[in-house]
Amino acid sequence: MNSSNRPFSQVHDILRKAGLRPTRQRLGLARLLFENDDRHVTAEQLHTEATGANLRVSLATIYNTLNQFTGAGLMREVVVEPGRSYFDTNTTDHHHFFHEDTGRLLDIPGDAISVSKVPEPPTGTHVERVDIIVRIRE
Amino acid sequence: MNSSNRPFSQVHDILRKAGLRPTRQRLGLARLLFENDDRHVTAEQLHTEATGANLRVSLATIYNTLNQFTGAGLMREVVVEPGRSYFDTNTTDHHHFFHEDTGRLLDIPGDAISVSKVPEPPTGTHVERVDIIVRIRE
DNA sequence: CAATAGATTAGAATGATTTTAAAGAAGAAA
DNA sequence: TTTCTTCTTTAAAATCATTCTAATCTATTG
């Protein structure tokens, strides 16, 4: 039993647990995303990267996959500027630096920043998540 | 000297100070935006509102104007979801509740929430602004 | 292997925003 | 006021990211 019989068993497992069929495209994208830690990508970036890694995937599939991964809790969407979506492989409690000149996103560990006095949400609502973006420039 | 000789002198003043010619469109939009306090609008919403108030303005002008007002520091852009921009007439230090079901934005007074331990930005950069979005649901 | 449910794709469609180029209005000068 | 110049507005086209469509393909199950 050589390695080709258990290809990329870790990401394979991740997909199985998320209830997603381990297709060639999803396996390839999952490897790019989850075999390195803490990545921030746009759909376009991931598409370029996949193409460069000899993985043939359409942009539509990149979008489908990023949305499925996000829906399954494997990634988080970070909204920093209108008209572009970033997806983050770090799903633990943390926040972001956003470099306004370069468009780059950097993690701020959860314990390196925190909110005090989170106000009561309006009646009938509950807090889903608190997002902090620290906008930086040169 | 009746009021028609000094039409809307307050917004007229705001525009003059911002270095923007007080055109009919800009005066009308400024009245809608600044004569009521703390407003959150999208371009489309403002366009509908202007039209309803008998102000003939194209959507392109709404976009131009919102961007000029923001550039002049009269408004702030708040990014809460990819693909839609909100503009906020409150430029003082404060943060937001974002109702994910309705898309509505609510102010959180600056002193009702605050960050502790803002981390050092990467070398060569400085903090431009800290945005906190408290995402709520029903 | 065959059937089927789900996935991928190219290309069209959508929606928000920006650009273009032409016509219109404001400020300055005479 | 008249003219000149500069800035604005506009409709329409263009752009950009993203989603949809409908046809083709593939993973899974029997």
Image (cartoon, coloured by chain):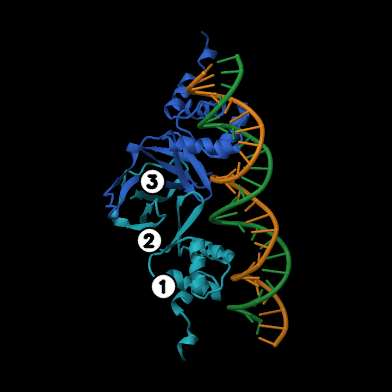
Chain colours: A cyan, B blue, C orange, D green
Mark linked to residue A35: 1
- Which residue is at 49% across, 55% downward? A85
- What kind of element bears circle 3? strand
Label 3: chain letter: B
Label 2: chain letter: A
In the image: residue A109, left or right of residue B104:
left
Q: Position of residue B1 (x, y in %)?
A: 51, 8
- What kind of element bears circle 2? loop
- Which residue is at 34% across, 45% downward? B128
Are labels 1 and 2 on one chain? yes
In the image: residue C4, left or right of residue B117:
right
Establish if B26 lies above or below A78. Answer: above
* Amino acid residing under circle 2: Thr
Marks 3 and 2, how far apart at CA: 18 Å
In contact (CB < 8 Å): disc 1 and disc 3: no
Residue in the foreground of this view, choosing between B111 and B14? B14
- Which residue is at 48% across, 25% downward? B35
Residue in the foreground of this view, choosing between B130 and B71? B71
Residue in the foreground of this view, choosing between A130 and A120? A130
User: Image quadrant of residue A76?
Assistant: bottom left
Q: Position of residue B38 (x, y in %)?
A: 45, 32
* Amino acid residing under circle 3: Ile
Q: Mark 2 — residue? A: A92
Establish if B30 lies above or below C7. Answer: above
Mark linked to residue B132: 3
* Visible residue check, residue A65: yes
- What kind of element bears circle 1? loop
Residue farthest to the bottom, as pictured: A1
User: Image quadrant of residue D11?
Assistant: top right
Please tell me how crowded label 3 is: few (under 14), some (14-19), or many (20+) other residues with Cα within 10 Å.
many
Label 1: chain letter: A
Marks 1 and 2, how far apart at CA: 16 Å
